[in-house]
Amino acid sequence: MTIDELTTLADILNKLVKADLRCTVVSFGTEQMVHLKSALRLTKRTDLVGRFLAGLTSFDGISSQAEAEAVLGQFDNPEIADYPRGSGWSFSRFFCPCAFVNGWRLSHEAKHCWCAFQTAAREFSPDGIEGLQVGAEYFTAAVEYMLTQAMDYETTEPDFEDWAVAVSESGFIDSLGETYRVGDVAVPPAPPRKKGAEE
């Protein structure tokens, strides 16, 4: 959104107020909103800052293996979200019932899952990454892909390569450069493939 567009929006809202109508504006955007707020301050348009950008709240993505594990754990918990609704079964139990009965949980996949996202990001920026954040859209798309692909698993579990494919299918790779800042923190190497895993 530009300064001119915000000015036009303010004019429209002023007309609505004169017509005795009330309106609340909630904006969602990228980090560019922070730059817009700075530009408005530099041009002395604090009226627009106060009206539309007074409070900026960051909606951060998943940024660590621990956070990935916590989110994946929600798919294991039927009290959080059961599937099918009312069944009392968790998503992971529904999609992988045999593996689930044998003790497998989606939360156990956090290391492979997070490493697959890091590896994809490292391929985009070989120098490493800092502040990697995976948006919910891409994270859940990878989880959905993994669950539907893992439906036939009984005792074997997904490995790093399975998660790498899930991350690729999620659309995350196309989003790289928009969801994190390139920095100088090295990404750990991908875990080795498990022995005995099917080729």
Image (cartoon, rainbow, N blue to C red):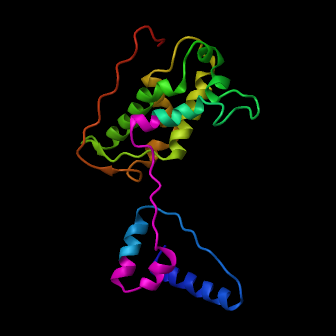
Seen in the picture, residue 162 relative to 18 is either above or below; the reply is: above
Residue 166 location in percent, x, y? 51, 32
Q: Residue at x 47, y 73 (%)?
A: 53
In the image, 80 versus 110, the foreground residue is 80
Residue 66 in the magenta stretch? The answer is yes
Residue 45 location in percent, x, y? 41, 85
Q: Residue at x 47, y 13 (%)?
A: 199
Left or right of 197, for residue 93: right
- For the record, the magenta segment spans 39-68
In the image, 164 versus 23, the foreground residue is 23
Q: Write down the quadrant of residue 77 in the picture.
A: top right
Left or right of 161, for residue 87: right
Residue 8 location in percent, x, y? 55, 84
Left or right of 144, for residue 199: left
Q: Residue at x 46, y 74 (%)?
A: 54
Residue 98 in the magenta stretch? The answer is no
Q: Residue at x 61, y 84 (%)?
A: 13
